[in-house]
Amino acid sequence: MKKIFLVIALNLSFFSIAQEMTTNDALRYAVENMNGTARFRGMSGAFGAVGGDLSAININPAGSLFFNNNFASASVSSFNSSNNANYFGTKNKENFSTLDLNQIGAVLVFNDTSGKSEWNKISVALNYDNTNNFDNRLFTSGINPFNSISNYFVDQANFFADTPFNDYQFDMAFETYIIDPHPTTPNQYVSNVSPGGNYYHDYFATSNGYNGKLTANVATSYKDKLFLGINLNAHFTDYVLTSSLYENNDNPENPSTQPTVRNIVFDNQLSTYGSGFSFNLGAIYKVNESLRLGASYESPTWYNLNDELIQDLYTFGNVNVPVEDTNRTYYGPEFVFPTYRLRTPSKITGSAAYIINKKGLISIDVATKDYSNIEYKNTNQNNFRDLNSQMSTELKNAYEIRIGGEYKIKQWSLRGGYRFEESPYETGDIIGDLTGYSGGVGYNFGESKLDLSYANSHRNYNQNLISSGMTDTARIKNVQNNVTLTYSINF
């Protein structure tokens, strides 16, 4: 049996970040999904100059002033995600659905009818929105004619820093025969997966969790013409990704002096949790009774995040090894990494809304967010220097447009919307643009309302099966179909 390489510590609390983060890990928190009330979703979130909706204050905090009375709402959503994968010509499809209470909040409205001040209205709101639902499932498979996943472990052994985490990555690969010392070059390692191509891969991943935002809002109006608001936001996140990557090959055996690895299973469970803070500033100007213009600023979100990682590695059907090592298993300990910080980009939104005889409205929002400003930090700035530099080069300032409309027929309201979000990448092949459509209906009972919406969006992206060493990706078309039901009441 091979010599056992001991990991420095099994209780694993390191002084430097060693886990291999990627740009897409940062985008998980920088790119927000469109969630909220049914009215908000039915109009594709085009509420920057409309207001009068608790989710709308996430776009423009001045919107809370367009409630006439104290108001509360709660929303339940059905989230359905469909992933169509294509990996070297092999196609697979996975669907996943969840049900969630995704919004709840209330606003209090105070009117000054004394005429002593031209600042004649104040609103105070507290609202919770599930800004991103991470529940998802993905399966992809196919024959890679070029690369083995063993390249990841060769990279870890040859090129990455000598830290406890990388020592562990080396140890697990060495103990399962995936890598061996280079026959002629000192301190270098080679793969024991036989060359020749045609590596069958299948990758199955499930993710669970959420990104939530609790908003405290205050707004005031001047002469019922200028509306100003501010939000203070507390963010909460909890994300778990469980994945299993399998490889098989039937290439000719390596020379008898070198082991041959036929099958590899690499299991990972990553948990990320933490909290953050951001704020919003917004203004809406009522040009006349029909036309409103809005502008808002959303600050970066400053997160404090924690990662926990468990990895297991298996090889079986090994050739040219001792009989007892034909199948090898390495169960990894739990790595608890130190807290690190993530700053997402700020966002600026310009809006306009046209009210049609108090019967309907048309609204448009245009927003911009510079994703190249994303930044990781921790006590040792050098840990993230290369990744931050990579993101500043790969990512760009992206635009978003949302268009929505509403028309009232007695107690009924009919709604529709469209939204478009540019890819955050300079090269759209990595993550494509997002296109979405929505529709909805509402019924006003007098003191209460019931609203229902349907929203569809789709976006294509490349999925890496492993974080480095093998650049081949699966092409994924993600389609989301969401239904939201909101009950609201004046009080």
Image (cartoon, rainbow, N blue to C red):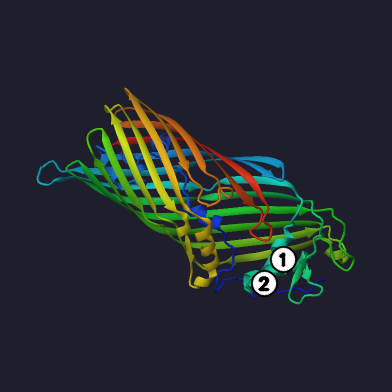
Q: Position of residue 154 (x, y in %)?
A: 72, 66
Number of the front mark, 2 or 1:
1
Is 181 located above or below residue 483 in the figure?
below
Q: Quadrant of residue 38?
A: top left
Is 102 located above or below residue 317 in the figure?
above
- Residue type beneath disc 1: Val
Q: Position of residue 318 (x, y in %)?
A: 84, 60
**Side of 372 where 350 appears, left or right:** left
Q: Position of residue 305 (x, y in %)?
A: 49, 62
- Residue type beneath disc 2: Asp
Q: Residue furthest right?
A: 256
Marks 2 and 1: CB-CB under 8 Å?
no
Pointer 1: residues within 10 angstroms few (<14), some, or many (20+)?
many
Q: How many marks?
A: 2
Q: Nearer the viewer, residue 136 or 200?
A: 200
Q: Residue furthest top?
A: 410
Q: Nearer the viewer, residue 31 or 338?
A: 31
Q: Which mark is residue 28?
A: none
Dividing the image into 4 quarters, which one contains the N terminus? bottom right
Give the labeled residue for mark 2: 167
Is 185 located above or below residue 72 in the figure?
below
Q: CA distance from mark 2 to mark 1?
A: 12 Å
Q: Nearer the viewer, residue 50 or 7?
A: 50
Q: Residue furthest bottom?
A: 186
**Side of 116 where 13 appears, left or right:** right
**Side of 131 where 356 appears, left or right:** left
Tell me the residue at 24%/37% (across/down). Answer: 68
Q: Which mark is residue 154?
A: 1
Tell me the residue at 67%/72% (across/down). Answer: 167
**Side of 407 where 163 appears, left or right:** right
The disc, 2 or 1, on the residue closer to the chain's N-terminal end is: 1
